[in-house]
Image (spheres, rainbow, N blue to C red):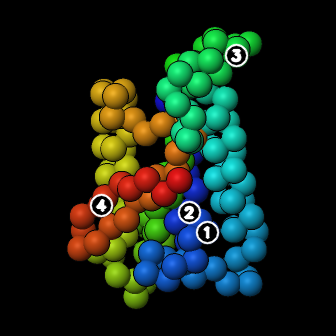
Amino acid sequence: LFVAFGAASVANQDPSIGGKITCGMSAYAASKNSVHHFVQSFGQMSGKTLGTKKVKDDFKIMSMRKHRYLDKLNVIGILPVTLDTESNRESMGNGDYSSWTKAEDIAQEIGTWIAIPDLRPNSGSLIKAVTKNGTTSFNLYR
């Protein structure tokens, strides 16, 4: 299992989920978009892939892979709106902390994916972590 962190604000410009990219954030947006693209591209080369292909087609792709170890690798991107970190609290002191995702919530979700592989999203998935009133949900974005 390979998990990379992107950003919901970059993936979707909807202000209700943190989509507030400004001109001063171009380097941040470019780096997060790169993570999103990497996850989706590498995800298509590994594990049970995401997309409209039938399962039969997935097995055909898997059998053509040069490196068989990629068959068991899942590449997943997690897109939090705002992580609840000390640094974020210092820089955004007036923020609504009840809408910030705790690292522990993300770790617990990843732990579930490790313990129960059938619950993992397909390789190449981007999963949006949205926290409301202190409760985090993980939803398929792409």
Q: Are marks 1 and 2 in contact (CB under 8 Å)?
A: yes
125 versus 6 height, above or below? above
- The spot of residue 60 in percent (x, y) is 62, 18
Name the N-terminal-most of marks 3 and 4. 3
Q: Residue at x 74, y 64 (%)?
A: 30
Q: Quadrant of residue 38?
A: top right
Amino acid type, mark 2? Ala
Which type of secondary structure does the marked residue at label 2 adopt? loop
- The spot of residue 95 in percent (x, y) is 40, 83
Dot 3, how many residues are within 10 Å of its Cα: few (below 14), some (14-19), or many (20+)? few
- What is the CA distance from the residue labelled 1 to the residue labelled 3? 32 Å
Q: Which mark is residue 123?
A: none
Q: Which mark is residue 10?
A: 1
Per the image, the residue denoted by label 3 is 65
- What is the CA distance from the residue labelled 4 to the residue labelled 1? 19 Å
Of labels 3 and 2, the one closer to you? 3
Name the N-terminal-most of marks 4 and 1. 1
Q: Which mark is residue 7?
A: 2
Amino acid type, mark 4? Thr
Residues 81 and 62: in front is 62
Amino acid type, mark 1? Val
Q: Residue at x 65, y 21 (%)?
A: 61
Per the image, the residue denoted by label 4 is 136
